[in-house]
Amino acid sequence: MSVEKTESTVPPGVRVATEWAWRLLVIAAAVLALLYLLGFVSEAAIPIVVATLLTALLHPVNGWFRRLLGGRKGPAAGLTVLTTILGLGLLGFLVGSQLTGGLSEMGSQVGQGLTQIRTWLRDTFQISDTQLAAYLDQAKTAITSSEALRGRLAHAGTGFTHVVAGMFIALFAMFFFLYEGDRIWQWVVRLFPRRARARVDSSGHVAWTQLAAFTRATALVALVDAVGITLVALLLRVPFAPAIGALVFLGAFVPIVGALVSGMVAVLIALVAHGPVTALLMLGGVIAVQQIESHVLQPFLLGRAVNVHPLAVILAIAIGVVSAGIVGALVAVPVAAVGNAVAKHLAGEPEPDVAAAVLDDGEAAAASG
């Protein structure tokens, strides 16, 4: 008795779309599950991410210390961490001392600036002093309401505690990444099946090279941004110019968005201290510096280091902000750049043989014997 084979009534295009759809749903569910689980250990996961970025940025410094000390890994890693702590401490001291010394001068300037702002608002938008005072009172009430203020203070205290603890974890992890990062990576590679180890190992080296290039290029761009905007602030006699430069330097590590937000802080300080005219001049200086960065530095440095389309950068930052806030915005572009480089590497790499896989210590000893 023969059974006739019936043809499927589902069109081929629909069948292919269905197969792609359920695979994409599985991938999305896996990513969401990973983000959900990382949320429970964010106090440990975020410092590890920061330590990885710092290690990629400071790896040349560690190599210089290692050559200076005759190849001794431990002391070189310790000196690199100590240099990082001293650098961050010096930056904090300079900003803090500048803020403390400029408060008295800022007090008199704020009064003059607020008078200019009030006059400008009254003449431009036809707002009376009574209406402006009512708006300011409403804003003051909303900001300083007891329950909201207590909640913000409690949240800030908890956040500060987490930042301090995370800083120690990041520095501790950074030391071991610099000291024995190769051994840690080989242990990670051995967690994968033997046949996939060669491909995982090569992908890891590609990812590390891409991450190192990104962090160094971003640091150079951030330094140029900070110096340029600080010089503009000094020329316009805007208060807290060094603090503005430090904020711009840190903000520039979040491409596009960070430089824009930190530049707006400089414009706001100029507005409060000197009024609308100086604020407009400060805005022009910020735009000029960012145009030089966008059209000269980023294509020359980041364009070579990170081959990611600007639209992909914006989408990556948006997804990072929605999923993980400021930390997500910080790591979004490096993750996109590393993922792009690894995907290109895997697409152009032939299937490795089993014999070419990375062997563990016992297998290596047996093979050499």
Image (tube, rainbow, N blue to C red):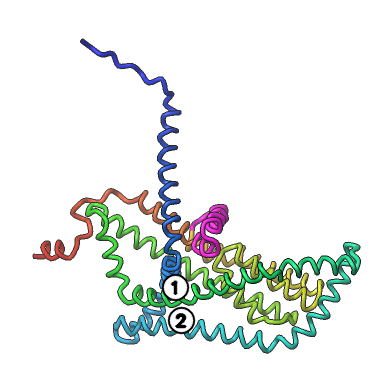
The disc labelled 2 sits on which kind of residue? Thr
Residue 49 falls left or right of residue 249: left
- Position in image of residue 229 (x %, y %): 66, 75
| Residue at which label 2 appears | 84
Q: Which residue is the site of mark 1? A: 54
The mark nearer the N terminus, 2 or 1, is 1
Q: Vertically, is 33 above or below 84?
A: above
User: Which residue extends farthest left?
Assistant: 369
In the rendered view, tell whether residue 320 sits above or below residue 70.
Answer: above
Q: What span is colored magenta in the figure?
A: 307-333
Estimate the x, y position of residue 108 in percent, counting from the top left.
79, 85
- Quarter of the image where one finds residue 342: bottom left
Question: Which quarter of the rendered picture does the N terminus lie within?
Answer: top left
For label 1, the SS is helix
Q: CA distance from mark 2 to mark 1?
A: 9 Å
Please name the predominant secondary structure of the magenta segment in the image.
helix
Image mark count = 2
